[in-house]
Amino acid sequence: MRTLLTLAVLLTACATTDTGPAARSDPAVVMTDAGAVRGAVTGRHRLFQGIRYATAARWDAPRPAPAWRGVKDATRPGAMCPQVGSVYAPIRSETEDCLFLNVTTPAKAATGRPVMVWVHGDGALGAGHFSDARKLADRGVVVVTINYRLGVFSGFGHPGLRDSGTYGLQDQLEALRWVRRNAEAFGGDPRNVTVFGVSYGALAIGGLFTAPAAKGLFDRAIMQSGETMMDMPAGSMVPGLPAQPSFAWRSEAEVIAMGEHFAGQLGCSDLACLRRLPVRKILDVPQIMNAFQSYAYGNGVLPDSPATAIREGRFHRVPVLAGATRDEHSLFVAMNYDMQGKTPDYSALVREAFGKKAPHILRKYPVNRYKSPSLAWSAVLTDRMWARATHEQNTLLAQHVPVYGYEFADRKAPMFLPLEAGFAWGAYHAADLPYLFEDGKVTLAAGQRKLSGQMIGYWTNFARGGDPNGPGLPSWPRLPDGTLSLEPGAVRPVDYAARHQLSFWK
């Protein structure tokens, strides 16, 4: 049925003026399986924005975009998925019709280019078009950036819902299916697809690694600062929040119980009522977006917790490039304390998080070793949460597939978020993004620009053949032979476990 529908669209479109012989030779016009789109062409790039890849009713599985006639404009981004913004991202959207993607390619016509599909981070925030992929496309790849449902519209659960807590992940699966069907039309190779993402996006890739429906939809994976294996000691992410066994995953039963609780706050006793609510009314409930950031397992999309599945060796066998930043937790500590004019009580926080083990930790990480209590607390949590989880993830994956581990270590990385510059951010969470994506608000120094070029080379080499190494780049060993430290003028393998004192945390 889908093939016949696509053929009908092609025949109809070719009969119109816009898609006649002249249009078919126009590099700004591409025929997708649902219809033609017209993007923008510059001297170096072709950019197509706001291409609808799917539609979805609230808390339903996405469906491929319906076919259209004529040529759709693809020169502007599509609507962002519903979100309420934050102190560092004052954005808001109330539009549920938001399943759009963007494609960036080199301007020069070619076929068989590697395809890189970007899953943005930021939890309950963001959209694909915020990531400017031109620097990556300059290296001869096709880059796809996607929107997907966020927060309560992604992770909500309730009795009667099928696959509660997985709707954003289902959107990503649908986007990957779109890429398999349409990459060739944009000059890409549908059999050479790398999925890559940062933070919440990398977490989602941890889910894709173990989701049965993702099998065969991607050929390589890059995970930047992901939380797949991470737990949360008490007070680590939010002051006063009790310890959680997993940062990333909740059982479907737990998510459904949360959904019933919030349904009462929204004034609803059944699913029909919840689906009728205006988006604004849902977004106006405090914390509802953040409460449902986790994905749920124990359903048809994620039968098991991805952390458990990876520990047991049950994941899709594709090469991996994965790592974290050297000072992952500095951003979260600063936002919880310093930016609010507060100084954390370091000793009390360590005791709350680690109980009887606190004296050992305070001796290993004495506050007088650091410039402030905030930096001491950041060092503890960077090692205990982020480095330990990243090392476990990469070590487990490397038992079955090629893994290239890295640590972004530029402690002078510019702050790209609208946050105060006085804090010693170091190599903070997601600090590597401006080194891969164009960011007009950030100025990189000469050494940082060189590092940016090296990283883009590594990332695109990996997308091309599953190995980041290439001419002119420092050698990057596969695990377990070392983790590559990415720092201006000092790109070299390091002992990641020793750098983050992981034998102490074992």
Image: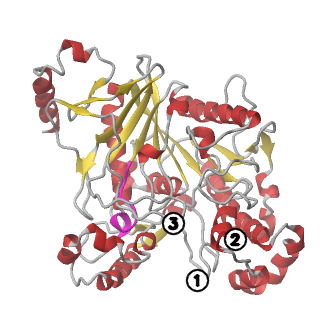
Q: Identify the element where label 3 is drawn.
A: loop
Magenta residues span 147-157
Q: Is residue 27 left or right of residue 9?
A: right
Which residue carries the number 1 mark?
242
Could you tell me residue 349's position as x and y percent? 72, 81
Secondary structure character of the magenta stretch overall: loop
Q: How far apart are marks 1 and 2 (CA)?
A: 21 Å
Q: Is residue 460 left or right of residue 15?
A: right
For residue 17, above or below residue 263 = above
- Dot 1 or dot 2, earlier in sequence: 1
For residue 116, above or below residue 424 = above
- Dot 3 or dot 1, earlier in sequence: 1
Quadrant location of residue 456? top right
Which residue carries the number 3 mark?
248
Q: Which of marks 2 and 3 is in front?
A: 2
Which amino acid type is marked by label 1? Answer: Pro
Report the front residue among 423 and 192: 423
For residue 378, above or below residue 61 = below
Which residue carries the number 2 mark?
338
